[in-house]
Structure formats: structure tokens, C-alpha cells
Image (spheres, rainbow, N blue to C red):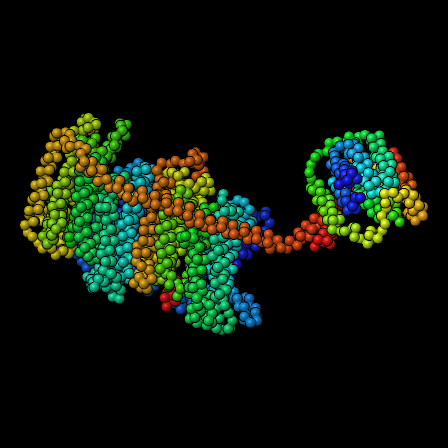
Amino acid sequence: MEGLEFSGFVGIISLLVILLPLLSFLLILAGQKGRGADLALINISLTFILSVYLFSLLWNKQPFHYQIPWFLIGGIEFKAGILLNNLTVLMMILVSGISVLVHIYSRIYMKGDPNIHRYWAYLGLFCFSMLGLVISDNLLLIYLFWELVGFSSFLLIGFWFTRHAASQAAQKAFIMNRIGDIGFLLGIMIIFSQFQTLDISALFGDNGLMKESRISEGLWISGSRQIPEVWLSIAGIAFFMGAMAKSAQFPLHTWLPDAMEGPTSVSSLIHAATMVAAGVFLIARVYPVFDPFVLNIMVCIGAFTAFMAATIALTQNDIKRILAYSTISQLGFMVMALGIGAYSESIFHLATHAFFKCLLFLAAGSVIHQLHHYRDKLGLDFDCQDIRIMGGLRKGMPIAFIGMCLASAALIGLPLSSGYLSKDAILITAFEWAETRNGIFKILPYLLVLTSWLTAFYISRLVFKVFLAQPKLISREQTEQIKDAPNQMSYVLIILAFFCSFIAFSYNPASFESSWLWNGFSSASIQKVNIYHWLVPLILNIGSLGLLFTTYKIYVKSDGISIPDRNLLYRFSKREWYLNEIYSYLFTVPVEKFSRACYWFDRNFIDALVLKSASLVGVLSGITYWFDRTLVDGLVNATGTLAKWIGRFSRNFQTGKLQHYLITMLLVVLSFFILTYFI
Amino acid sequence: MNAEQLIFYFFAALVLISALMVVTMQNLVRSIFLFFVTLFSLAALYVFALADFIAVTQVVIYVGGVLVLMLFAFMLSNKELLNSLEPIKRTFKLNHLAGIFICLSFLFILVSLIVQIDFSGLDWIKSAAPILEGDNTIHAIGMHSMTRYLLPFEVLSVFLMMALIGAAHLARKGKKI
Amino acid sequence: MIPLSHFLIISACLFCIGLYAVLTKKNAIQILIGIEFMINAAVLNFVAFGRYDKENGGGQLFALFAIVLAAAGVAVALAIILNVYKHFKTIDPSKIDKLKD
Amino acid sequence: MLSLLIFLPLVAALLILVLPSRFQQQYKYITLGVSLIQFVLSLFIYLKFNSSSLAAGISKESQYQLVEKLPWIRLNLGNIGSLEIDYFLGIDGLSMPFLILSALVTFVATLASWEIKTKLKAYFSLFLLLNTAVIGVFCALDFFLFYIFYELMLLPLYFLIGIWGGIRREYAAIKFFLYTLFGSVFMLLVIIGLYFSVINPATGNHTFNMILMMDPANYSYGSIFSAIADKNLFGISARLLAFIVLFVAFAIKVPIVPLHTWLPDAHVEAPTPVSIILAGLLLKVGGYGIIRICYSIFPDAAMQSAWWIGLIGVVSILYGALNALAQTDLKRLIAYSSVSHMGFVLLGIASSTTEGVSGAMLQMISHGGLSAMLFFLVGMIYDRVHDREIANFRGLAEIMPQFTAFVIIAFFASLGLPGFSAFMAEAFSLIGAFTSEQVNGLLPRWMAVAASIGILLSAAYFLWTLQRMFFGQTRLKGGEEWLSKLSDVNTREKFALIPLAALALALGIFPSLLFDKMNASVLAFVQLISG
């Protein structure tokens, strides 16, 4: 009885958690335009408070599961429900917490936009769908929210829809995600046809159907259903594809840099902290589905993505693009971690990354915001996001600078930062995992180390160029006039900065194993190799610090770009590995052409065939008509015509001309003669 | 071939040629004059058939009567009639073809019949005593017309008078019929 | 002595010439001339056969009658032609087709 | 009850014909009133509908609801027996949803008819006649009656397209008419064949009763369509041939590739309300016919040809989507998207699984609402500026924000955004198709995989259109003139659009609204055809 009451209570709270943002979405659309900002903030704050409450109730407790019947199809009942476990409540608190901060930040950042109410409404929709995605207990529901997240992301990226680039980016993001969604849907199809249920706890729980199913003789058998084994791998790849699109993994990552066309606050919330983590979340949720083959693919793709994105970030000049590629790179780390089985490390990194990347974006946002104001005030014209024109902003914007530095430290993984804990945890586990593998998998950890060093390089390049280097376009005096953003924004930065330190996650700054978050998840059983636990962080940090120093030399002291410009590698990186061009060449253009060809085929072949057959029928009917008119009808007419002809013929004899009569008469006589005498 | 035959065929040829010219001639006046020639030569042929009186009558009636009638009737009273006839196109119409066809077939039929039939073998010709060159035919005609053929003779004279009166009546000017 | 059949052939030829004129000529007077040819052809036959009818003299006598009749016919015909011309302003028989319905 | 539903519009049509032209401005209110009454009636039927498995219908006459059976034509034909045609109406879970859809779509189409300005009397009476025929088709259980209603649909449509249509209306109307007639003429042959094969066990006469046709025991032995005798016709099984003929007849309506080319022309040339009815209801008649007649009467032949039907479905999905991608005319784009979406119906039916058939049914209802909405939206633009070229519009979102909101809803609902009905429908069609190999081995799995690409393509063409027409800086071909003409959604249009959006949303979130009512029938249907 008490249990029932408890479950009802928690259920209502979790429902409230997801419905409050939806409420703000609906209210704002229904006409509460003026009070959009307040409404949204109040709702999301309430959501956050409730999430914290739920977190305190359920963290490290028995997972909570509550279902109601949804619909019945055939003999199978679908249920909608809520599943709260450690992962869920963590994600909830993460999403709602960062949302609250971004809401506060956006009040200033988005001030003055004529369509601001839409912005609040879309944010509400996003929070609703993201939280819904997190707490759903059912693959179909997850899919539902999954696409809704993509939809709200579409709306937010295209928020400034009058800008062509923005609407283009929104479209690209949605379609890229759709590719992943197809994979997800395929995964759902396979799972459903195999198990006739989509309930996560029933499928992937401790004694779930997935565990019960077995593989024998090339068949994947569950109960009475069986399917060739290959479909298990396909299901894994399919789910992974969904995650790849959402979490911007190679080759479906190109939408994320473009998505930076949206407002920076949106980028920080959706495209850095929360939505992109949904892919990782999904992998975590359906983890049992992946067989070793798929996991290996995951490792390769994760590592490759991390590396590739880092190389691209090296040369970008748009401040948000650098951060976007950095995000992709970090997501690559997480995916790779999931692939090697480092489930808890991955989630850990997801959490820390959410904070420090959010901070990076918001700090960058405040720089952009202030530059924007400055530009508008002076009537200048320059790109507010180009780091080449920035420089020396440290004096005017100390808070942004400090925030940025802290977040960068976490990103690089310097000691005492949160990143040090989570990222090194991943690397250590990767090395431990590689111990048991061979071939290409041996070198993957080293690739990650390299990536980490690259990370150190590109982020320090960013920080140094923006805050420390000599200003390029504007004089130092002018630069000092650019002040820190208004207080509300700065507070947010400060709060986030706190979460970049180790304190929020662990009492011991050196060991991730003492982190409460890491301990909250069941650890994968990987052979522990102690040597890595101090060697890897050491090497990493020495390398990173060395790089930091070099970067400082290059960008602050020597005041110029000394790296060789415009060589092949540079251009390769600058143009983002030419992937956009390759995709356009390989997919977009051919599909467009193919569709034209199809239409041409449709018009000129199928339709023409129909028309031709129609005209053939026309000709046939013409022939029939001719036949009818001349032969059938003709026979009838012929008798008449014959009589007429005879009449007309004989009428010819009565010409009234004497000589004709005479000729006729004589002809008759003649024939009489001939008949008589010659025949 | 003796002289008699020679002269006969000469006249026969003259008859046929002049007759052909008469019917093919476009000029009416010329064809009327050529008509004389035909009639004269025909009269000559009658002579060869030992019908002197007929030949003379032919000349008198045709040349003296019919031709004069024709020429004078038209030349004197209806000049414009002759003029209007001048421009006749020389076309070879179907009509002509049919006419020619009919004529030729008749000619063929007649000639072939004449050739087939052996006239001298006919009974009445065989048994009859033909007129000889020295016979007085005029006397015989006179006798016969007043005796044996009196009725036709009288009918003919009445008929002749009717025709003359009728012709005169028809040819009267001014009044409509 | 000229054989009978020669006369007959000449007469047949003359008859056909006359017939031709009657059938094809576009002038009433020429048609009249054609008729005269045909009558003459007949007369020639009479005369030719008349040689073998000495006793009755039918051939020559009827030739005589025929000539006289022809002359009378010509007189009437000419009068008719004149009237026709007055009425139709033409003596082309092919243009006078009032007999047509 | 059903008769009331069917003949109410007919009575109204007669009323309009009788009323003097003085009242011609009132005709639309009469029509609107009729469609509202119909809607209320159908809602009542929906609420009262018995969804227990004892009222599943399909092949059991006693399980049909709201049955009306009256002897209609009884003619003693001497040796052949006596002619037995019934006025036989009834509904089960597979036809009931269409009644609501018909009423709703008619309602919306009536609201769209406000823009019709000429020959109102003829227009509204034909419109109501069409309404009668459509509802009649969904209710009729006697094949003869069904055929009459089926043919009765053609006539008003022909005139509605041919008189009130666009520039090439005659061409489109004739093309549509010939296409459909082509199918139905052969259908008539099969109907007659069935008539002479089936014997009503109660009376011993030949009968047109569809339900009796579904029971193999009712076929007289040695008759042409008897399942036991399995006669051959032209070298193939007579039943298979009959199935193919019926399938083609209905598939033209659906339409399937390659029998779809009447659809773009007819839709583009038809006036907006007729496009709405065409897309919203007429296409569904095809799908309904396939379920109710082709599959139910010839389940054995259906099983034999399932692979091909599935293939046609997949081809329709992909081919329609690719064609839609190439369009420059908005209405044509939507017409081709219909081809693509109706492919899912075929795929779902071909799978012969409960999931697939339910998905197909839901897809029909969902597409009925959504395509009506899409055509209504296109019609709104067309009525304002008489242009539909996508390239002539740009940045509409700024001048018509509410309109754009509706377009976004309609587009995203159509492209299968979860939360809208199309998603549930397509997902379950695909799931059904995928499961098919395991359950009954009819469709290979790759079909489902290939068809899911269609979802991606639909996203591509809808989003591309959205981006081209609505986003970006405002730039119109007609300049200032268009700017003043392109007013935002007015109240009448909202009345039409909101119910449709609500339907899509409601069915997307609570598919049980539909699934619960038809689940028993779907189960019975699947059992009938696979059993």
C-alpha cells in the first residue's frame, strides 16, 4: 500500500517534471507572449527543483518503474511508462540544471529579439522532449521523444529563419538526424519482431528477454521467434546509427558545426550539453543489444571521430565552430568509452563535459554578445565570431576569461579539474582494454592520447587568441572598453565554473574511482592495470602543458601565426576534411538528380505509356468507327447508294440533248446487233 | 479494170471523201458547197446503177432545191447565225468518241454483213432479169407511177404540199408559234 | 458491170458518215446535212437494188419518192431550225436541253 | 442509422436543386450543416461502437453492427435461379473509422468550398452526391450495392474536376475517369463471376452478399471461383486472376506505381475542396476495397501475391518520394507524397500481420486527415495569389506566421514526426512488414528496410520545401501586390485546420482511440486471410 502510494507520488512528480516545460511551451504559444521569459524560467526552475528531489529520492536506490496501458495492437499491449534509475535521474538533473542556467543566461542574451516568445516556447518544447526522452521506459516512446528533440533542435537552429544559412543548417540537422532515426527505427523493428515488446526493463533488465535470448547455429532465438544471427549485429548497428546522428559521430557529424547558426545559448544547451548526449544515453540504455562486433565498430568510430574532429578544430576561425568540433571530439571519447565497455566512465564524462562545454559556449557567447553590442554602438562591420579579429579581451572581460580558462582546463584534463577525472578515466580504461586486444585496437588508445594533446592545442589557441593576443582590428584602448557581460550572465558563468572543478564530483582530485558519480554505475569488468593509473595522466598532462606553453609562445608572444599556412594538411583540416563536399557529391546531388530522372521517367515513360495506350485506343476506336461507318453502316447505305447511283446513272441519259438520246438509242441497237449476229 | 469501173470508183471515192470533208469541215458555208460535190458524184453513181432519171432528179431537186434553199434561207435572212458559228473549238470530246465508235461499229456490221451475204445468190436476184444498158427506164417509171404506184404517188404529192405549207408557216417572221 | 455489193458498201460508208455528222455535230444545219447523207445512202441502195427489179421498177420509183420526201423534210427542218434559233439564240442541239427534267 | 448517414446529403442535394437560385449564398451553409450533422452522427456511432471480439465483423454477418438488410431486387430468372440483391448495410471495425474520416473531410472540404464562386447550385448538389456515394461505399455489404456506390463516386468527381478545375481540367478529368473506369469495368466481370459462383445457403439462390463470398463453403462446386475446384482461366488460377483484377481496380484508386499518373494531374487540376476529397477519401476507398474485398474474398490468392503487393508498396513509397523531391509545383509535390504515403498502406496490408494491418488502417485515416490539411493549405495560397510554384515564394514565414505554423504542423506530421498519427501508422506498417517474415513468411525483411528510406526522403522533400518557401528573406514573384494579398489564416480556415491537426495529434499520442475500436476486427481479418 505504501509502495503504491510512493509510486504514484513519484510518478506524478516525474510527470510534472516533463510536463512543466510543455506547459510553458503551450502557454506561450497560446498567447502569453509578454510573460514568456518569466513563465519559462519559473517552469524550468520548478522542474529543476523536482528533479533534484527525485534525484535525492532515487539515486543509488531501486530503479523506479511505473506503467500505464497505452494502446493495444493485435494481441500485444503497448504501455507507456516511466523508468527512473541512476542514469535517468542523473540525466534529469543535468538537463534541467543546465536548462535553468541557460534560461537565466538567455534572458539577457536574447533580449530585444522581436520573436523572443518563440524562443522561450521552443526551449520549453526542447526541455519537455529531452526530459521525456530520459525518463521513457519504452523504445517507442524514446523514439517519439528522440525525434521531438530533433524537431525542437530544428526549430531552434532555424530560429533566425530569415537567414538562409540558419534555415539551411536546420534542414541539414534534421535530415542528418533522420538518417540516424531510420537506423533507430530499424532497430526497433528488429527488437519488436524478435521480442514483441519494446519495454526497456523487460528487454534489457537483469533478467530481460535480451539476456534470455541465445544464439545457436547462426540463429538468434528468443522464445518461439528466431532470426538469422546477422540481424542482431544489424540491430546493434542500427541503434548505433541513431546515436551516431544525434551525437554527431563520423560520418553523420556534419550537421553539428552548421547548427552553430542558432543562438549561442541554444548551442550551449542543446548542441553541447544535452541533446548531443542523447546518443550516448541511448547507447547506454540499449547497451545489451550490442554484440562484440558492433562494440568494436563503436570503438573505432568513436576514436576516429575524436581524432578527426580535433584535427579540424585546430584550424577553424569561428569561435563557435571550434567549440562544436571540440564537442564532437569529446562525444567521440564517450562513444569510444562505451564501446570498450567503460560504461560508467562514459557517463561520468558525459556529466562533466556537459558542464564545462556549456561554460565554454556561454563564455564564448558573452564575448560574442559584448562584441555585438560594441559593433552596433560604433557602427563597425566585422564578424563577431571570428577569433582572428579578437584579442586582448582579458582586461575588459575577466569573468569570461576566467570561466573560459577553467573550462578549457577541464577540457584538456588538467589536474584539479573535473575533466581530469573523467577524461583520464576513459583513457586509462582504454589502455587497460587494449591490453586484451591486438591489432588495430592496440593503437587506438595512443590515438586518443594524441587527440588529447590536439585538444590542448586548439583550445589554448582559442583562449590565447581571444583574450591574450594582440588585438588585430581594434586598438588596445578600444578593446578595454569591451566590458564583461551583464551580471545575470556572469553569475551563470561562475556557477558553471564551479562545476568544472573536481569538487563537484569527487573529494579526491586525483582518482576518478572515488567519484560518487562513477560509483553510481555498475562498473565494467576490465582487468585493472595499475601502472596506467598514474602513467597515463602523467604523460598526458606533461604533453598538454608543453603544448600550452608552445601555443602561448606562438599566439601571445610572437603575435602571429607561425605555423605553415595553406599547406595540404592545413587546408584539409580547414575545410573539415572536405566531408561536406564529399557528401554533397556522393549523396545530395545524386539523389536530386535521381529524383529528377524519376520524375522525367514518370512523365515521359509511365505517363506517356498511359497516354500512348490511350491514343492507341483512340486509333483503334477510329479504325472501328471507320469499319463501322464504311462497312457495317456502309452495307446498309450501300443498297440505298446503289439505287441512288443507278438513278443518277440513268439520269445521265436524260440530258435533254438529242444527240445523247440518239447515241444511247444507237448503242442499244448496236448491242442488239452484236447480240444477234456475233454472240 | 476497164474504164467503166475506173470512173465508178473515182466517183465513189469522190462521194466518200467529199462527204467526210463535209462532216469534218468547221466552216459551214464551205461544207455546204462541198455538199454539192457529194450530191453530184452520187448522181453519177446512180447513173452507174442504170438509173438515169433518178440521177437527173437528184441533181434537180437537191442541187436546185435543197441546196439553194439552205444557202439562201440562211445567207439571206440570218447572217448572224452563220457568224456565231465561226468560233467553234476544235475539241475532241467524249461525244465525238462515242459517235465515232458507233459509226465505226455500224460500218463494221454493215460491211461485214454485206461481205458475208452473197447477193448474187439470192433467189429473187437470180431469177430476175436485170435492167440492161439499153432499156428505157424513164418510160417504165412513168408507166409504173401512174399505174402500179398511183396511191403512193398521190399521198406523196399531198404530203409535199403539207410540208411546203408547214415550212412556209414556220418560217414566217414576227409571229410566235 | 459494177457488182451490187460495191454499191452497198459505198452506201454503208455514206450512211455512217451521215450518222457521224448527226451524232457529233454541234450545228443543226450540219446535222441536217448528215441526215441528207443517210437518205442519200438509202437512195443509193434503192437504186442499186432497183436494177434487179425491172418488172415493177420499185427501186427507182421509191428512190424518187425518197428524194422528194427528203426535199420536203429539208424545207420543214430548216423552218424549224430558224424558229429554234429565234427562240434559243442558238442552234447547237447540245445546248437545247429543255427535254431534261 | 447508416441510411440516414448515407442519404442525408442526397436529400440536401435535392433540397438545393429545388431551392431557387436566389438562395445560392445559402447552399454552402446547407452543405456545412449536413456535414456537421454527419460528423455528429458518426461520432455517436464511434462512441456507441462495440469493440469486443464478438462484434468483430469481417466474415461473420451476425457480428456486424448497425446492420440494415432489406430485399431490394428479387427477380425470378427461370433456369438461372432468382436474382437476389439486397440493400445491405453494416459496419465493423474496419469500416467505422472511415465514417468519421468521411464526415470530417467533408466538413473541411465544405469549408474550402467557400472559394467556389460559379455555378453554386450544380457544385453543391454534385458535392453532396459525392458525399453520399463515398459513405455508401464504406457501408455497403452487398457487392452490387457497393458497385453502384463505387461508380456513383465517379460521376460527380468527373464533373467537379471538369467544370471547376484548373487550366487543364478536361484532360485531368477524362484521365481520371478513364483510369478508374478501366478498373471498375473489369471489376464488374469479377462481380458477375462471383455472383454465379456463390450460393446463399439460406435460400439456395445466387447472391451478391459479400460476407457470403468470404466463406469458401458457399461456392457451388464446379463454379469458376470455387476454391476447391480451382479452375484455370487463361492458364492461371481463376481465383488468382480475379484477385489481380480486383486488386488492380482498387489499386488504381490507391494509387500504386505505375498506375498513379492520374493522381498528380487530377489533384493539381481539381479545385481545392475536390483535391481534399480525392486525397482524403477517394484514395482510402482503394485501400478499403483491398482489405474488405480483395483480401477477404480471395485470401488464398492474396497470400500467393503478397510478395508482389509488398514490392509494389515499397516501389510506390520510394518512387513517389523521389518524384515529390523533383517537383516545383507545391500541389503536385503533395500529390506525389500521397503516392508515397499510400505505399505504406499497401506494405502494411501485404504483410498480413496485425501490426501491419493496423498500421495500414491508421495510415489511411491519418493520411486522410493530413492530406486534406495539406491540400487545404495549398489551396489557401492558391486562392490568394493564384500561384503554386515553389520557386515563386520565399520567406512566407515572416508575413504569414500562423499559416506557417500550420504548414509546419502539417509537414512534420506528414513526414512522420512522432506524436503525430503518420508516425504511428508508418512505424507499425514497417514493423508489420518486418515481422512478416517471422510470422507468416510473406515479405522479406529488406522490404521494410527499403521502405524506411522513404521516411527519410519524405523528410527531405518536405523540409526542402519548407526551407525554400517559408524561410529566408521574404521575396515573392508578385511583389507588393502579393504581399497585400497574402493575408494570414482567417477564422473559417482555422475552423477547418484545427480539427485536422487535432486528429493527427490525437491519433499520434493516443492511437488507442482507433486501435481499440478496430483491434478485434483486425485480428479477425488476419485470422481470415491467414487461416
Instruction: In this rendered view, identify the residue nearer to me: A214 or B62.
Output: B62
Q: Is residue D470 visible?
A: yes
Rendering coords of residue D66 (x, y %): 47, 65
- Closest to the observer, D432 or D222: D222
**Quarter containing the N terminus of chain C:** top right
D440 above or below D503? below
Residue B28, percent across and down?
Answer: 77, 33
Image quadrant assignment for residue B81: top right
Estimate the x, y position of residue D485 in percent, counting from the top left. 45, 38
Examine the image and state in which quarter residue C8 appears. top right
Count the numbered circles shown. Answer: 0
Which residue is most to the front? B2
Q: Residue at x 88, y 45 (%)?
A: C61
Which residue is located at x 7 percent, y 44 percent? A538
State the quadrant of the C terminus of chain C: top right
Q: Residue at x 24, y 58 (%)?
A: A231
Q: Would residue B111 be found to the left or right of residue A309 on screen?
A: right
From this viewpoint, is residue A81 visible? no
Q: Is residue A328 above or below residue D105?
A: above
**Residue B130 percent across, percent down from the top left:** 85, 48
Looking at the image, which is closer to me, A100 or A533? A533
Residue depicted at 26% across the width and 40% down the height: A581
Name the outermost residue toward the left.
A531
Q: Who is closer to the viewer here, A106 or A546?
A: A546
